[in-house]
Image (cartoon, helix red, strand yellow):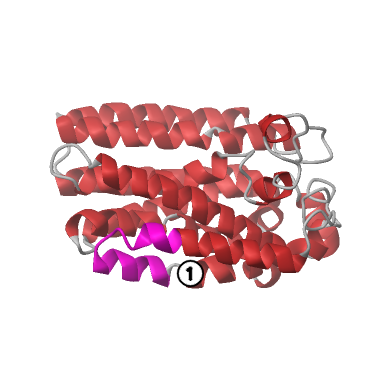
Amino acid sequence: MTPHTDLLEGDWIDRFLPAPVRPYARLMRLDRPIGTWLLLLPCLWSVTLASDGLPSPVLLTLFALGALIMRGAGCAINDLYDRHLDGQVARTATRPLPSGQVKPWQALLFVTALLLLSLAVLVQFNAFTIKLGVASLALVLTYPLAKRVTWWPQFVLGLTFNWGALMGWSAVQCKVEAPALLLYGAGIFWTLGYDTIYAHQDKDDDAKIGIKSLALKLGTQARPVIALFYAAFFMLFVLIGLMTGLGTTFYGVLALAVLHAFWQLATWQIDDPANSLRRFKANRDFGLIVWVALAVGKAF
């Protein structure tokens, strides 16, 4: 990958997939699984916290499949909306739609197929969770428009990407309760942090073409504001621990996540796109630490 494009050449997609399939795999971002992780982790947190004992492997598998498919559908929808804008941004100009590898009508058919696959996964859950899943489509379809109208598209992404915190709880309990709402809120603050870091990759191009983001809105204040976002995340998780009676080991492991967040911000080079991408991707490990904290807090 060069500094000017996010297209990975010579990776497993090029080596193992037939040529006609490759643009669709890239449209789904199968070569960049971080988005799937960030969509899945709130589901894992919620299922683990809501379960009596070990979480169901079936539920975890269903959420993993759903995250993979819906993240792919969301990326394709986003690229359909942004195909003309992406062509003006160096990092995204080589993506399948702006580069012409996939036609808009082909992408639309592909999105339809992905949504049908996600429906097949969704109907495996209880009726309340199915309704929540259908409701999430409103966010999936409108999020790509947010950066055209608000400086806070990261907030809209947070509403979208953390919906699984509600669905994970309802998949176990057949309802949404206060801890699930706190998980949802914490996830939104987390997304505000990591996606603002991510947005710093494109801030120069975004400013030129009129795209809004917190990276541009916050300017030199981005680091302390992101620190506040992460602080709010941890405050809500402490409240979740108290509300659900998690053991002291939960707080010990959660402290490791605090250190991880401190490392992210302390080593973040705000004007280095490659560094911003690495710190963004590091949030997979951050989310996994939080998951372990919840698991051991439940167990002990």
Q: Main secondary structure of the magenta part?
A: helix
Where does residue 263 sit, x and y in percent of width and height?
Answer: 53, 27
The picture quadrant where one finds residue 170 is: bottom left
Examine the rendered structure and indicate whether residue 225 appears above or below residue 120.
above
Q: Nearer the viewer, residue 129 or 231?
A: 129
Where does residue 165 sit, x and y in percent of width and height?
Answer: 34, 54
Which residue is labeled 1 in the image? 137
**Is 38 positioned to the left or the right of 172 in the image?**
right
Give me the residue at 31% from left, 27% from top. Answer: 253
**The magenta segment:** 118-135
Examine the rendered structure and indicate whether residue 77 appears above or below residue 288.
below
Q: Tell me the crowding category of disc 1: few under 14, some 14 to 19, or many 20 or more residues within 10 angstroms, Cα based.
A: some
Looking at the rendering, in which quadrant would you find the N terminus?
Answer: top right
Q: Is residue 247 visible?
A: no
- Please, what is the three-letter code of the amino acid marked with disc 1? Leu
Judged from the image, the secondary structure of the residue bearing numbered disc 1 is helix
Give me the residue at 66% from left, 37% from top. Answer: 277
Q: Nearer the viewer, residue 270 or 208?
A: 208
Give me the residue at 58% from left, 29% from top. Answer: 266
Q: Nearer the viewer, residue 296 or 43?
A: 43
**Is 141 positioned to the left or the right of 6 in the image?**
left
Where does residue 284 sit, x and y in percent of width and height?
Answer: 49, 35
